[in-house]
Image (cartoon, rainbow, N blue to C red):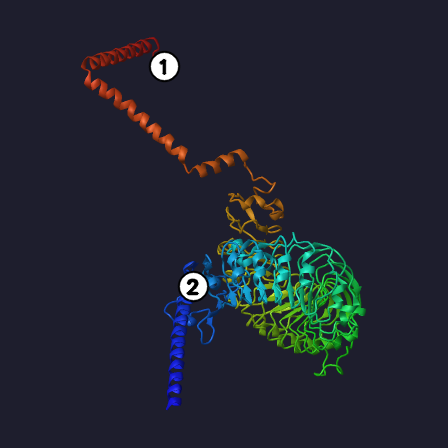
Amino acid sequence: MEKISILGFILAILYFITTELACNGHTRIDNNVQSEQKALIDFKSGLKDPNNRLSSWKGSNYCYWQGISCENGTGFVISIDLHNPYPRENEYENWSSMNLSGEISPSLIKLKSLKYLDLSFNSFKAMPVPQFFGSLKNLIYLNLSGAGFSGSIPSNLRNLSSLQYLDLSSKYLDDIDSEYLYEINSEYFNNLFVENIEWMTDLVSLKYLDMNYVNLSLVGSQWVEVANKLPSLTELHLGGCRLFGSFPSPSFVNFTSLAVIALNSNHFNSKFPEWLLNVSNLVSIDISENQLHGRIPLGLGELPNLQYLDLSWNFNLRGSIFQLLRKSWKKIEVLNLARNELHGSIPSSIGNFCNLKYLDLGGNYLNGSLPEIIKGLETCSSKSPLPNLTELSLYSNQLMGKLPNWLGELKNLRALYLSSNEFEGPIPASLGTLQHLESLNLGLNEMNGSLPDSIGQLSQLEQLDVSSNHLSGSLPDSIGQLSQLQVLDVSSNHLSGSLSEQHFWNLSKLEYLYMDSNSFHLNVSPNWDPPFQVKSLRMGSCHLGPSFPAWLQSQKNLQNLGFSNCSISSPIPNWFWNISFNLQWLNLSDNQLQGQLPNSLNFYGESQIDFSSNLLKDLFLFQSKGQMTTFTELAFVGNPDLCGAPLATKCQDEDPNKRQSVVSDKNDGGYIDQWFYLSVGLGFAMGILVPFFVLATRKSWCEAYFDFVDEIVRWLFRGRATYAKNHPRRR
């Protein structure tokens, strides 16, 4: 019995304790939930959300609000992801609809479990990075890239000892499509700087650091020592940070985890930093767009994990491409050595680069011919050379010889740039088997023969440039099948023959058409309606006449037009001047155009025009609208019957002063003539009415006035009678 009493007493105590703990625990959880919710509401109240992006932020279940994630079971907020999903540079309208701005409330400090904060690509227009971010001590991820912050990056971010990912980068205006620049305020780009970077050594957990286009010019060479002290750092992005001088070397290399280093678009003026060859974990190196000089180390080809190397646009890096490409490059996928001073010929061993996706050696001094046969059949599992290559750029070198057939075996190739070399011989028909090819540029070479009909099989082709070669024959009808084609340039060859509607029937995406300096004869129906809307059209030296091409009337986006020497002998139709206001460049020279130019030519801005060597006639008077002053005499010479400014030839009976007066009178709109006639009329009326009213109201003046008039009349009659008496009429 006593044992039962003791057991009951113990159970009662346990029940009381557990009940008390449960109740208190539930109360604490409720308090925490209310605190987290209030912190989020306060944060939202400081934001400007014109398109109601945060419309879901209402009610008590905040863990389901857009951009919010909570810890399971506790309701603690662990993630706020409000990044703008649309890139501002090419989807401006979508970006603006999702854009947040305003103030960032310090209420975020109350979110004690917050680990992830992403506010990137919004527009906090030139506000500084909030100091209180340094108090969010549990943060693992912080992304403020491209959100418009400015000023000095606060050093108290050093308190974020758990931080693994930090992105304070910005886009650079050079990376933005010019079409969207006018819509983008510079305040929407981070304008941050750092005076002293030592505080970053406390970020001992940091793995990813992106400070692209943060101004580090005051940091000097400190950055390399700081990065060397971050034991977990795997990615370092310091592109466009205004770093300059010699590329610094650490006192000892401790980059045991570093896999990615990107220092592009700076001003380093030194040799390649060979200490990087000791960082065996490197996967990616980008030191493009600097001023590096000297030899490219051959040891780069032996880095066991290297997949990406970009040393382009340094201009002064030297080396033998034959020696470089004979190294193993075991995992290389992207190799960009363009715009340097590489020399030598390309070895056949390049076929062994089984993982290579992108190769750019353009703008160097490579010579010799491409190897007729390349290795790789035995090495690569696909039993084909360069099986993963998608882009091959060898433009602007001194390469020569015929194009090898193995180019047609690069089954995944999307872009082939071989322009500005000395290649000769025919274009291989095997290129027509590259079903993924989007860009083919063979311009500025010495190639001959005809354009192969197989080109029409390239269903994905967007750009075709074979300009400035020695191609002959006719243009294959199959060109008209290229439904994705945007650029077609066959200019400056020896091509001839008839161009029918079949050549263009499916080119609905065509925007740039260059066929000039050939001998084509356009043979289309008078009511032909082209399937394309081009921006730039050059067909000089093609036979388009004798009538001015009526199909041109359908081209509403035209900015550049070249119809010189096209055997056109008709007047310029009136509808042409309705589409000319968008033209920035116009050449209608060396035809037999007739008729009179309009007094007012409406072109776009500082346009360049050429009407020379035609049969235009009559007086040509400019009514200046700003841009007209840029037109020179050379634009109109060679028209025997054309006279007037800006030509030196004066028209008959042309008085410059009189012409100026006439133009001035026209500009005055008859203002002076109207006042002249009005004043004459008023003077005439006043001369009659004033004396009438005076004589009507003053009887004595009236009698005296008419007595005076009568006396004058009598005097005149007496004089007349005396004259008649003294001078009788002769019979």
Name the quadrant containing residue 213: bottom right
Residue beneath the point at 36% across and 69% down: 59
Disc 2 crowd, CA 10 A, few/some/many (<14, 14-19, 20+): some
Q: Secondary structure at mark 1?
A: loop
Q: Position of residue 635 (x, y in %)?
A: 61, 48
Residue receiving disc 1:
730
Residue 392 has which mark? none
Disc 1 crowd, CA 10 A, few/some/many (<14, 14-19, 20+): few
Position of 415 with respect to 97 (left or right) is: right
Q: Earlier in the sequence, mark 1 or mark 2?
A: 2
Position of 114 with respect to 217 (left or right) is: left
The three-letter amino acid code for the residue at tag 2 is Ala
Name the quadrant containing residue 236: bottom right
Question: Considering depth in this image, is 357 or 84 the residue closer to the camera?
Answer: 84
Q: Position of residue 234 (x, y in %)?
A: 65, 68
Q: Secondary structure at mark 2?
A: helix
Quarter in which the N terminus is drawn = bottom left
Question: Considering depth in this image, is 700 or 461 the residue closer to the camera?
Answer: 461
Residue receiving disc 2:
39
Q: Is residue 176 visible?
A: no
Q: Is residue 430 visible?
A: yes
Which numbered disc, 1 or 2, marks the residue closer to the eye? Answer: 2
Quarter in which the C terminus is drawn = top left
Q: Position of residue 83 (x, y in %)?
A: 50, 65
Question: Considering depth in this image, is 36 or 415 the residue closer to the camera?
Answer: 36
- Residue at the farthest bottom position: 1
The three-letter amino acid code for the residue at tag 1 is Arg
- Inter-mark Cα distance, 1 to 2: 129 Å
Residue beneath the point at 55% across and 63% down: 534
Q: Position of residue 652 (x, y in %)?
A: 56, 38
Question: Considering depth in this image, is 13 or 210 the residue closer to the camera?
Answer: 13
